[in-house]
Every structure is written in structure tokens, then in C-alpha cells.
Amino acid sequence: MNNQQTRPPVISVNNLKVHFPIRKGVFSNIQGCVKAVDDISFSVNKGEMFALVGESGCGKTTTAQTILGLTPKTSGTIDLAIGPWNQTPVNWNDLDKKGKKELRKHLQVVFQDPYSSLDPRMTIESILEEPLVIHDYAKKERSDRIGQMLSKVGLSSEYLHRFPHEFSGGQRQRIGIARAFITEPEVVIADEPVSALDVSIQAQIINLLQDLQKDFNLTMIFISHDLAVVRHLANRLGVMYMGKIVESGTEEQIFNSPLHPYTRLLLESIPLPGKGRSSKGQGLQDEQNSSLSAAKGCTYYPRCPKRTERCLESYPDLKDAGESHLVSCFNC
Ligand SMILES: Nc1ncnc2c1ncn2[C@@H]1O[C@H](COP(=O)(O)OP(=O)(O)OP(=O)(O)O)[C@@H](O)[C@H]1O
Ligand SMILES: [Mg+2]
């Protein structure tokens, strides 16, 4: 794990903000904004599996979409040391159309919903061939790669002429994974790749992603709302709450010595074998008490068992609690 920390960063996110305007009234005047991502910084090193975790609406997908160049950022920087730019990192704004196409070949995504992410009118062969056509692979290489990729994800080549509706959810996610990996990208972002699947299928898909990551020596961002899913999978984790990263560290630091009360709450919400969900973890479902919300202070203040007057004054910067274990809390 420490080995991974010394490798060069492939993705460096610095002070990223993504704010969406809220428009109201007949003239759609801007009335405020949703701070989906609010000043986050993290980096992902080569060959590393980095997990971004947090409850629904905390900004995980927006972060991923911005790294993928699909959502514009409000401010901050995202430097990508990928493909031809591995020595001189680029960001999306530096690139022309051709450059963006080249970067996309090396930076792929697996979506959450295997039902809607595959075009129902296309056969599996054409779904897998499409990225290879876009990136100008010759016919022979296209069919070779499709055959190899199908076998890597555990699907038979007999399925090539079938349509997505003829497959189960798990099989469809295998097709989505094959499509993401077929151009041999250096980085894959998997946005909740198992949350739409049955529990029994989840483990198979997680194992598949883990095997592929090792085979391809891939850098990966794995997004999940469930800490249990990323346990033993991620090398490092970032815990998000309301657009901010509140804690980041290695798998060992986060699972064995969590510091932020929100990370502790997420861990307490993991069901224990034979015991169900810990009662303390039920706080995760608590409604936020808006009367307690701190306008300029810590966004976790209303739910925090450690809150003090100081937390109302300003938002706590991430501080290093030792060995790059970062936490944003005055009282942790
Ligand atoms: N295009 C958009 N316009 C306005 N608000 C948006 C837009 N996209 C996301 N948001 C808001 O930004 C916040 C973060 O959304 P996001 O989808 O990134 O969360 P998430 O952590 O991925 O949640 P989930 O676990 O439910 O997928 C939410 O409040 C969401 O409503
Ligand atoms: Mg999401």
C-alpha cells in the first residue's frame, strides 16, 4: 500500500468546485446554487484502486463526471497524466477534439445501471465494436479483441449476436465492463457498478473488476455509497459528505482507525454477520436538522456528536493525522 503511495499520481484533483445554478420563476433567474462538489482535492496514483464513498447526493457522480470531462467544473484543476500525457499532465480544457478523443481511449467508465447504459437496439458485438471503430482499430484486431474481452469477462462468444434484453443484470454489467476495458484504458472509473445488482451477483462483479485491474495494471476509481463493498478492494479511500472530502486514508486507516464521526457512522452501518445492522448506525437515516445548520461552519455540524461552538465559525480544513491520514474536523 505504501508502495502505491510512492507511485506518481495519474489523476490530481485540486480545489475542485462544481456548482449547479438553481433557476426559478418565469425568466429562469438564478436563485442560488447546488454545491455538488465544493472544494475537494485528492490524487490517485498509478495502479491504485481509489474508492470514493458517501451517502446519496454527496457529489460522487459529479466528481466522476467532471474527471471524465462530461460535466464542466466551476473552478479548480484536474490534471490527468494518462496515455501520451503521462509525463506532462493535461486537463480537458487544454485539448482540441482530437486530443479529447485520444484521452477518452485511455480513460473509461463503467456505469451504475447495466439496464440503461447499453443501447437496446445494438447486438453485443456492435456494442463492443463501437469504441474500437471510434478509435480506428483495424477489422481483424477488432474481432480479436472482442473475442478476448468476452472470455476475460466470462461470457461465451455465442452471445455476440444477442441483444442486451436477452441477458441478466449481472451479465449486462459484464458487457458494460467489457466495453469499458476493450480499448485497454489506463484508468477506469466505476460509478456504483454493483449497486443495481443482487447481492449474490455483486461479489462476482467485484471479483471480476479486481482481477481485471490486476491483469491490466489499471488505475481505478471505484464509487460506492457502501463502505462494506469497497473493503479489501480499495488501496485508499476518500469519504465524501455534502460535496466535501471529510476523511481520506489507506484501507487500513479508514477501517481500523477511522477519525471523522461521519466515517464512523458509515462503518457502524455495515451489517455484521449474524447480528444485522448495528443500532448506532441507524443515525445514518437521521433527517438533517436544518435549524442547526452552520452557514459558514462545518456542514456535518447538525449530525455531529463532537460538535463545539468553534465548528460554527469556519469549515475545518483537512489536516494530516499522521502518515497521510487526512481528516476535516476540529475535534477529531
Ligand atoms: N445537472 C445537475 N443539475 C443540478 N443539480 C445537480 C445536477 N447533477 C447533480 N446535481 C445535484 O448535485 C448533488 C450531487 O449529486 P451526485 O449525483 O453527484 O451525487 P451522488 O453522490 O452520486 O449520489 P448517488 O449516490 O445518489 O448517486 C445532488 O444534490 C444532485 O441533486
Ligand atoms: Mg451517483
Image (spheres, rainbow, N blue to C red):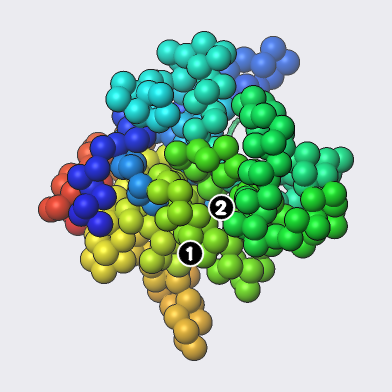
- Image quadrant occupied by the N terminus: bottom left
Q: Could one spot residue 99 in this view of the protein? A: yes
Secondary structure found at label 1 = helix
Q: Which residue is drawn at 70% across and 60% down?
A: 155
Q: Is residue 330 left or right of residue 84?
A: left
- Image quadrant occupied by the C terminus: bottom left
Where is residue 325 drawn, in percent x and y? 21, 52
> Foreground residue, 203 or 224?
203
Mark 2, residue position: 192
In the image, which disc is placed on residue 229? 1
Q: Which residue is drawn at 53% across and 47% down?
A: 190
Residue type (three-letter) at the residue carrying disc 2: Glu
Real-space Cα distance between discs 2 and 1?
Answer: 10 Å
Residue type (three-letter) at the residue carrying disc 1: Val
108 is higher (above) or lower (below) than 286: above
Q: Could one spot residue 292 in this view of the protein? A: no
Circle 1: is it few (<14), some (14-19), or many (20+) Cα within 10 Å?
A: many
Q: Which residue is drawn at 46% across and 20% down?
A: 92
> Foreground residue, 63 or 203?
203
Q: Is residue 257 left or right of residue 63?
A: left
Query: How many numbered marks appear?
Result: 2
> Foreground residue, 224 or 125?
125
Q: Who comes first in sequence, dot 2 or dot 1? A: 2
Where is residue 193 drawn, in percent x and y? 58, 54
Residue at the extreme front of the image, as rendered: 140
Secondary structure found at label 2 = loop
> Foreground residue, 145 or 5?
145
Residue 307 figure quarter: bottom left
Q: In this view, does 293 lie to the left or right of 103?
A: left
Q: In this view, does 201 lie to the left or right of 252?
A: right
